[in-house]
């Protein structure tokens, strides 16, 4: 077991969301023992010889492998892994510097056939896959917590509530591309896999007891092929863009965002470190067409504001010359349904379907002690209800809904729960429409707007 804390151990970081939520309770109850490394801090693995030793140890271990990766989010443009932590029974924790190696094929071979234990697998799998590390099976402790209905599923919270250990979280937002990595950072990273195996076993037992182990297996199997979605028109997420008026102003936001993104990718820094979103909005509102006017624009600032002034000006000049037909619209074009708030105006019957289905899905989630978004991906629900099957015979309709959901990628356990609810909502909305004009109440429209906010 981990070592007992000493009187000199520092408190958990008050800035951590889990710790912050428990501040009041912690003043009334004694702190849980601080989690420490049972085998001490391992050395960084950054040579071929050391990697082969680590791989031999992992291959000779038993049971699942706890694995985690650290990225430099907020500092780098890329999402590459800058540190990999692993722990398996029968060997000690390993800290691997992936930047030091051209290939981690020996590590992939050592992990072949072993179950991976990750926390929030969708965050780490892309950067691990990028360097050739792909699981044959996995267990996601965060997702397990969601399926069990826990309201807070951060690693620190689950470790404390399920295992009784308090975790250090003071280095959660550091720049992991730093070299050499400081010892306290490495200790923090190693602790993330210290008791991940024990947490996995506890949650696995609870899934079985709740009758949700097959649901979890389906979810974990689906995660193995997870790929992060590429957001269409990502520039539309520019903070404060709602203050920009006119289509040409939107085109300016787009041009400046794309220019900044190209620079950030080239330099491998997070885009906000070149100029912030507020600077893009300020320039799009003012539309300065020369360097002096740009640099005197109120609100246009940032490390790269003056350095890349000619790039910003050129982007704005190009926008000023665009034909009207080439300017972006306020609403994005996509292959999916419109935003929920627009349904009541565009198709009141579809809006009624969505309201009925959402109410039923919420009840279904509560009955099964699940977050509603885990019962069914909201986008799948909206697509099915915006363009439902044409058939209305109840049995055939249910079959058609099942087929649609499967085509979108819903798991069989989700389909079994959600398809009957969706089919009923379609039939009930049709019945209301047959009885007279469908009017969606104001409060229901507000609920649809809340769905937009969730996106």
Image (cartoon, helix red, strand yellow):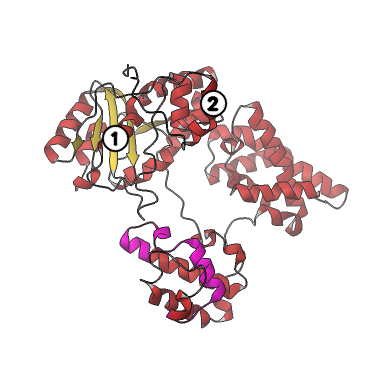
Residue sitting at 51 percent across and 83 percent down? 321
Taking 105 as reference, is 36 left or right?
Answer: right
For the residues bearing labels 1 and 2, Cβ distance under 8 angstroms: no
Q: Quick one: SS at disc 1?
A: helix
Q: Is residue 282 magenta?
A: yes
Q: Residues within 10 Å of mark 2 (few under 14, many from 20)?
A: many
Could you tell me if residue 365 is visible in this image?
A: yes
Q: Main secondary structure of the magenta part?
A: helix
Q: Nearer the viewer, mark 1 or mark 2?
A: 1
Image coordinates of residue 70 in percent, x first then y, are: 33, 41
Image quarter for residue 174? top left
Name the residue nearer the viewer: 93 or 138.
93
Q: Residue furthest right?
A: 436
Q: Quick one: SS at disc 2?
A: loop
Image coordinates of residue 202 in percent, x first then y, are: 44, 19
Image coordinates of residue 179 in percent, x first then y, are: 23, 47
Residue 422 vs 233, above or below: the answer is: above
Image coordinates of residue 293 in percent, x first then y, are: 48, 79
Taking 455 as reference, is 190 left or right?
Answer: left
Which mark sits nearer the N-terminus, 1 or 2?
2
Report the span colored magenta: 263-291
Could you tell me if residue 150 is visible in this image?
A: no
Task: Write down the residue under mark 2.
Answer: 148
Residue sitting at 39 percent across and 72 percent down? 306
Name the residue nearer the viewer: 57 or 171.
171
Task: Write down the residue under mark 1.
Answer: 184
Quadrant the N terminus occupies: top left
Name the residue nearer the viewer: 293 or 386.
293
Q: Residue furthest front?
A: 8
């Amino acid at each position: 077991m981990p070592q007992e804390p000493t009187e000199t151990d520092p408190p958990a970081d008050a800035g951590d969301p889990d710790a912050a939520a428990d501040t009041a309770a912690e003043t009334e109850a004694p702190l849980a023992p601080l989690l420490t490394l049972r085998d001490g801090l391992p050395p960084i693995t950054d040579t071929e010889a050391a990697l082969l030793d680590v791989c031999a140890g992992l291959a000779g271990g038993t049971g699942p492998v706890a694995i985690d990766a650290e990225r430099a989010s907020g500092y780098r443009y890329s999402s590459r892994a800058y540190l990999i932590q692993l722990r398996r029974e029968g060997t000690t924790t390993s800290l691997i510097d992936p930047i030091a190696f051209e290939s981690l094929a020996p590590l992939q071979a050592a992990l072949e056939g072993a179950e991976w234990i990750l926390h929030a697998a969708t965050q780490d799998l892309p950067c691990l896959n990028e360097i050739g590390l792909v699981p044959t099976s996995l267990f996601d402790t965060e997702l397990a917590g969601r399926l069990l209905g826990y309201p807070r599923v951060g690693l620190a919270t689950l470790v404390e509530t399920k295992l009784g250990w308090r975790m250090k979280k003071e280095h959660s937002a550091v720049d992991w591309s730093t070299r050499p990595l400081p010892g306290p950072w490495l200790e923090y990273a190693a602790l993330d896999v210290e008791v991940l195996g024990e947490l996995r076993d506890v949650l696995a037992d609870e899934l079985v007891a709740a009758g949700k182990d097959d649901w979890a297996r389906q979810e974990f199997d689906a995660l193995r092929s997870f790929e992060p979605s590429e957001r269409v028109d990502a520039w539309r997420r520019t903070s404060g863009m709602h203050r920009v008026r006119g289509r040409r102003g939107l085109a300016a936001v787009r041009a400046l965002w794309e220019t900044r993104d190209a620079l950030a990718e080239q330099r491998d820094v997070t885009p906000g470190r070149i100029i912030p979103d507020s600077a893009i909005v300020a320039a799009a509102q003012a539309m300065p067409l020369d360097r002096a006017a740009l640099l005197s624009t109120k609100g246009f600032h940032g490390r790269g504001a003056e350095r890349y002034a000619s790039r910003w000006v050129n982007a704005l000049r190009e926008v000023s010359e665009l034909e009207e037909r080439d300017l972006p619209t306020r609403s994005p074009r996509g292959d999916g349904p419109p935003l929920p708030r627009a349904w009541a105006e565009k198709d009141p019957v579809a809006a009624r379907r969505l309201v009925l289905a959402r109410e039923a899905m919420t009840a279904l989630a509560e009955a099964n002690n699940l977050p509603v978004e885990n019962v069914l991906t909201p986008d799948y629900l909206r697509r099915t209800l915006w363009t439902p099957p044409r058939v209305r015979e109840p049995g055939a309709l249910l079959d058609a809904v099942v087929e649609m959901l499967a085509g979108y990628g819903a798991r069989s356990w989700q389909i079994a729960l959600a398809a009957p609810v969706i089919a009923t909502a379609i039939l009930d909305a049709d019945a209301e429409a047959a009885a007279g004009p469908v009017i969606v109440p104001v409060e229901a429209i507000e609920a649809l707007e809340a769905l937009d906010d969730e996106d």
